[in-house]
Amino acid sequence: MAITLIVGALAVVFDTTIVSVALNDLAKELDAPLSTIQWVSTGYLLAVFVTIPLAGWAQSRLGGRHLWIAALGVFLLGSILSALAWDATSLIAFRVIQGGAGGLMMPLMATLLMQAAQGRNIGKVMAIITVPTALGPILGPVLGGLILHLADWRWLFFVNIPFCAVGAWLAWRNLTDDRPAPDRPRARLDTVGLLLLCPGFAALVYGLSRVGGSAGFADAKVLIPLIGGLALVGGFAAWALPRTTGALVNVRLFRHRAVASSATLLLLGGISLYGSMMLLPLYFQQVRGEDALGAGLLLIPQGVGALLARGLAGAYTDRVGPRGVALAAFAFVAAATVPFAFVTADTSEVLLMAALFVRGIALGAAMIAPMGAAYVGLEHGEIPDASIITRVAQQLGGAVGIAVLAVILQHGIGDARTPGALADGFGTAFWWSVALTAVAVPLCLLLPGLPEPAAPDDAAEAEAAAEA
């Protein structure tokens, strides 16, 4: 099951990281301004946030296997159409189709694996779930750079075809047919929740995406969607909280300390991860003069570290509990980011790559521990909502991190033209990244520790229930 889901999920993760390094080339090839081409990424991200909250309801209607295959099929269709796009507008529209499918797939992957694990070995399961997100930063930018160097930009999307095709075939063979019985009452869609939550998330992300190209958070183009988005999300919380069943997302799960603390840490982890993913390649390109492929190659150590950390972090999460692992991980992320706060135009690349490797190890553990903690003590039917909450928290953190650090970087570099002056601006932005990560360290103490071993009678009852 893990291999089956990873193959399909790689299409989504690679697509995101490949396209992120190709925006300048797409602007030239499609003869469109960069402000328009940015919507190739922004439109995709908005579509992801619109469909993430629908994952739990869609699974209850179609079953996990059929929903996974359907989402892969839509993602494949969007990829082919994107490759055949004739201008910037059509490419943006087809990327929205991809984003809608990707928004369903990522929380569904976590849900299917956690439900299959039945609450056991949560750390190891999280290590499996994070394989695509660990591989994406390693191979995505390099693959994107190679494609642009050797072939036409359309192959940025054609490359998804084998992942989608093989992933769908494996899913048909290996995933259990878990469609609800015909005589079982069908889950009803929370229409009010849908009209509040999905546009609310989209407005928040849209507002955050406008920060970098405006006067900052004070700009009306940023404030209006942010305030509107917060109002809609708040309205959804007021609508859903009194309901024990039927809400689009079960916000009552925030009453579990593990879910609330995990979501907070994943939000901060998203800020640290995605914010730095924006800063690091820009530093290598603007200060060191690297092209997209060169910047991608220099970022490989961070991805390798994150990949190597998975097994160790998963094992220690099961052995000592998520609290201790997250505490150490976030502290090391902050410490490993400090060298970048002192960067100059001539800082040793060997030193920076060593810091990236350590940072990658810490980031891998910093994602695994809180994600695993969110599922501690949950019922089988609560897992889909926990997957949605954790995915939204991490993605929102990424949007916030990119927006905040983009504003700080703009103010830091100002009218700087020399590599040294540009490096000083990047150093300031990295100091803020360190501070935002350090905020998460004391919050790790709110995560659950190692759960108490079950009594013999309880273990026997749990085993009998699982067999039933």
Image: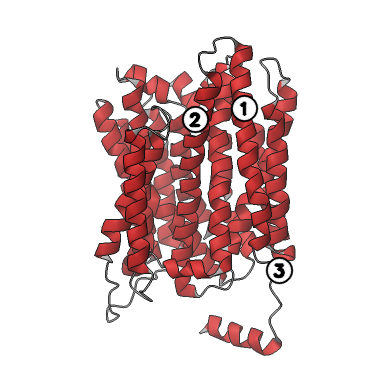
Amino acid beneath label 1: Thr
Horizontal side of residue 369 vs 291, given as left or right? right
Disc 3 on helix, strand or loop?
loop
* Residue 464 image-quadrant placement: bottom right
What residue appears at the point 29 percent right and 57 percent down from the top-left corner?
A: 196
Q: How many numbered badges does the structure rendering display?
A: 3
Is residue 101 shown to the viewer in this render? no
Separation (CA) of disc 3 from disc 1: 38 Å
Discs 3/1, front: 1
Q: Toward the viewer: 73 or 119?
A: 119
**Left or right relative to 285: residue 245:** left
Residue occupied by mark 1: 428
Whether tag 2 and tag 3 are in contact, CB under 8 A, the answer is: no
Please report the residue visible at 54 percent of the width from the left and 45 percent of the height from the top.
270
Measured as percent of width and height from the top left, residue 27 is found at 35, 20
Residue 393 at x, y = what percent? 49, 52
Looking at the rendered structure, the secondary structure element under dot 1 is helix
Residue 313 versus residue 288 in the image, above or below = below
Label 2 residue SS: helix
Say which mark, if any, is on residue 406: 2
**Marks 1 and 2 close (CB-CB < 8 Å):** no
**Relative side of 143 to 365, left or right:** left
Residue 301: quarter of image: top right
Q: Which residue is mark 3?
A: 450
Determine which quarter of the picture holds residue 461: bottom right
Which sits earlier in the primary sequence, circle 2 or circle 3? 2
Point out which mark residue 281 bears: none
Dot 1 crowding, Cα within 10 Å, few <14, some 14–19, many 20+? many
Instruction: Assess disc 3: are there few (<14), some (14-19) or many (≥20) residues with their C-alpha within 10 Å of its C-alpha.
Output: some
Specify the amino acid type for callout 2: Ala
